[in-house]
Amino acid sequence: MGKLRTLTRRTFLIGSATVAGGVAFGVYRAKVPFENPNLAALPEGAASFNPWVIVDAEKVTFIAPLADKGQGVFSAQAALIAEELDIELDQVEISFGMPDKAYMNGALTDAMVPFPQYDYGKVAEGARRFAGGVVRAALPIMGTGGSSAMPDSYDKLREAGAVARETLKAAASQQTGVPIGDLRTENGAVLLPDGTALSYTSLAAAAAQIEPVTDVPLRDPSQWRILGKPMERVDIIAKSTGTLPYGIDYKTEGLLFATVKVNPRQGGSLISYDATAALAMDGISDVFEITGGIAVVANNTWTAIQAANAVTCEWGTAGYPPEQDAHWATLSAAFTDDKVNAEARNIGDVDAAPGAEVIAEYRSPYVAHAPLEPLNATILVSDDRVDIWTGHQLQMFAVDMVAKITGVNEDNVHLHNQFIGGSFGHRLEFDFLKQAAEIAVKMPGTPVKMTYSREEDFAHDFPRHITMGRGIGKHENGKVTSLDVQIAGQSVMTSQISRLGFSLPGPDTQLHEGAWDYPNLNLPNIRVRSYKETGLAPVSSWRSVGAAPNGFIYDTLLDETIHAAGADPLMERIRLMGHDVSVKVLETVGEMCGWNGHDLGAGRGRGVAYVFSFGVPVATIVEVTQTERGIRLDEVWVAADVGQVIDPVNLENLAQGGTLFGLGHAMNCEITYSDGMAQQSNYHDHEAMRLYQAPKVHFTALENNPKIKGFGEPPVPPAAPALGNAIFAATGQRIRELPFNKHIDFV
Amino acid sequence: MQASFIVNGTERSVDVPEDMPLLWILRDEIGLTGTKYGCGIAQCGVCTVHMDGMAVRSCQVRAYELDGAEITTIEGLGTPEAQHPVQEAWIETQVAQCGYCQSGQIMQAASMLANNPNPSDDEIDAVMSGNLCRCGTYPRIREAIRLAIQKQGA
Ligand code: FES
Ligand code: FES
């Protein structure tokens, strides 16, 4: 994070008008008080209009700094710039760039204020701006997560393109004498009235010499060429021909291959080890101790993994209960006054509310991230610099940690971010990177690629946090009258932030997210209270974080109460909602499937669920059939409101993928501990969904939300309750514990 | 041992331990990284290549089984400039999210269609269910296979 010295030098240079042949352009200066990191090394004749656009005599380059782990943000960032710059995506080179606070994510704080994200009132919006300002000043985070990419980028990157365009026009006007008003832009060029095209690249040197253009208005969506229409992702050909390099594919001269074996009791120590057998194997360079375990360096990854398996280790104990039963018992005992995390919502009086009661307890287990690309990082420690090739979602923290381990100043630690083969939250963590750094620092001058075996990836995952819910629903005269939801969970934010070296300043909002902000605005009595546990296994954000377990608890209790009241699951949800954007989402999903009640007769049924997360209301309907061999998922309908659709193809892909991700884990997956170790070690015992179980998923996107929202996570939370509600509709069996396959078979 | 075999039409000879899996020979010895590592135990399918025309999990094929074999990897199936019909279908359908599983999915689908140009839905489910996709691109995989069938028929 300490770019302070270079910043001061650059600021001084900007004062003297030109910087190394480039000019900093400034609508941003008022809003984002960070210097353009491209200027430091900008060659003569090149112009960089802002941190995201560089033009030189040869090419136009976009910097797309948000990490791409499959959600398509590499393409989307480029499309936002290209739309305003009037250039096609095949005419530009796109790079992840280097970490810098100029690329801070301005939308991460939206979830940090105590207002539900459907509240766009003055006070709530003011609090969001304030939180954004505080974080920008104190700790500008360059990060990808929280479905924040589009909220962060939507205006910023379109403005970046617009500023670049207008500045290039100003340069063309200066060069030709034609007034700016008579110039147009198209296809990467400024067009003169006589049709002559001056390519942007030919204008780079001139543009580098002129004053910045400011306050360029953005185009109305009705004028868009690229955005809002089906796009071809820029990485789609490479990803379909095996030619896209991921971090794990990194190659360089003299590369050695490593792996680690670290105490599977998370956080426990290495007491002793014997590497005799490993060291006798062909192709082994070294075996040595690292924090909590050993590392093996070899001439290929397979040999390294074989050798690591041959090392015998004596491990210390973990700081959490060794057996799974004790984890549940701990949570069960956590519903006490001294463990209250927050009374996140209290409307009316749930105790005095009239009606018959539904009382239920729910469980949501630990679940692994297990992205298909095992975690890996390549690091080269040289005399005066460190280079890292890996994919990470928190790039500046990553640089900071490697700087500390290698003892090299962070200004000289260079993170080359790579395409990521899935994350689901695991690439927000640092252990793999720190281990790679501990290895590389022992081998200066040699690039070393550290790759986890799949077994190590499972053993060292920080899974989704474990959650227990207790609820009382009430109903009277065929209507739901009250919901009292209590949630106890291992605090995911406390655990995750501790690994960044911070302590959590307030309550862990992820212990009630998705429940406290469920917009049942027409329900007179609601209480959502969360309880915080911190003594269980270390955990981390898992795609949609708290909204998945909490949404499962809240929406299932609601469904149970609706059924007990004898009301229609969809109609009663609509009646209780009172939030127009969400009502429309529920109505839409009902229309999509031709909703006509939950009971389809003869062992068939439909379940509806709704969860509001990351500012996006999503409603999901699942249809299932009970067959002789188990439950079959027949079809799924999903409606969501993201405010503004950037790429309908990618959005549908995320809706389908996120829904299947939510369903697959709800059906089949949990991580359990025994002797302090995760009992699941590979995909055979943590399978999630395979093709034969995957139903058709229909999707409709709405655009009534007042602001653009991200969609990487929101499709996940309603999937599990929708399936549970469908199983109940088809069979009469109410399953209150995930994964469902502990209680029922699937075909 | 010295293992000699053909990869994407080129003869290769590597000096490796006899039980070294083809996956790692391709990735770390030959440098063809389009074939991926995911599980190492035949559970995910990301390492799928063709061996003498059959789809195999390269993490399960050992060096001593390779002598004289003809291996095709994703890089040999087609290229960005000259795509195999299955790759064309995958691109048109925009199947990939993170994309990490897709080399294996495409190799599995190409081998299925080479042996059975018009599989039923059940046959597709049976053949393709060994290939995991953590991102959940299954609906598009089905769509792309249908499109590839059309293309190959045309
Ligand atoms: S790596 Fe071979 S099947 Fe998973
Ligand atoms: S596209 Fe990511 S695993 Fe399949």
Image (spheres, coloured by chain):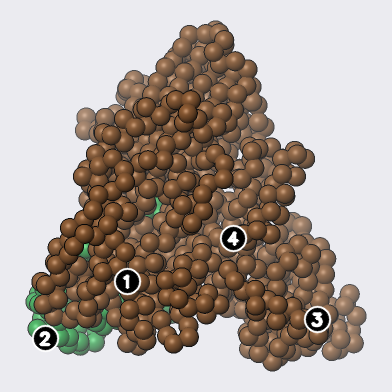
Left/right placement of residue A17 relative to residue A621 reads right
Q: In the picture, which chain is brown?
A: A
Sequence-wise first label, 1 or 3: 3
Residue neighbourhood size for the residue with mark 4, other residues' Cα within 10 Å, grouped as few (<14), some (14–19), many (≥20): many
* Numbered circles on residues, count: 4
Residue A524 vertical placement versus B97 (above, below): above
Q: Nearer the viewer, residue A477 or A8?
A: A8
| Whole-percent x, y for residue B141 in the image | 37, 56
Sequence-wise first label, 4 or 1: 4
Badge 1 amino acid: Met
What residue is rendered at 60% in x and 65% in y? Answer: A77
Q: Which residue is mark 1?
A: A450
Asked which secondary structure carries label 3, the reply is helix
Q: Nearer the viewer, residue A41 or A138?
A: A138
Determine if residue B108 is in view: no
Q: Which residue is mark 4?
A: A141
Residue B81 vertical placement versus A464 (above, below): below
Residue A67 vertical placement versus A204 (above, below): above
The yes-or-no answer for disc 2 within 8 Å of ligand 1 is no
Give the Cα separation between the discs numbered 4 and 1: 26 Å
Q: Which residue is mark 2?
A: B2
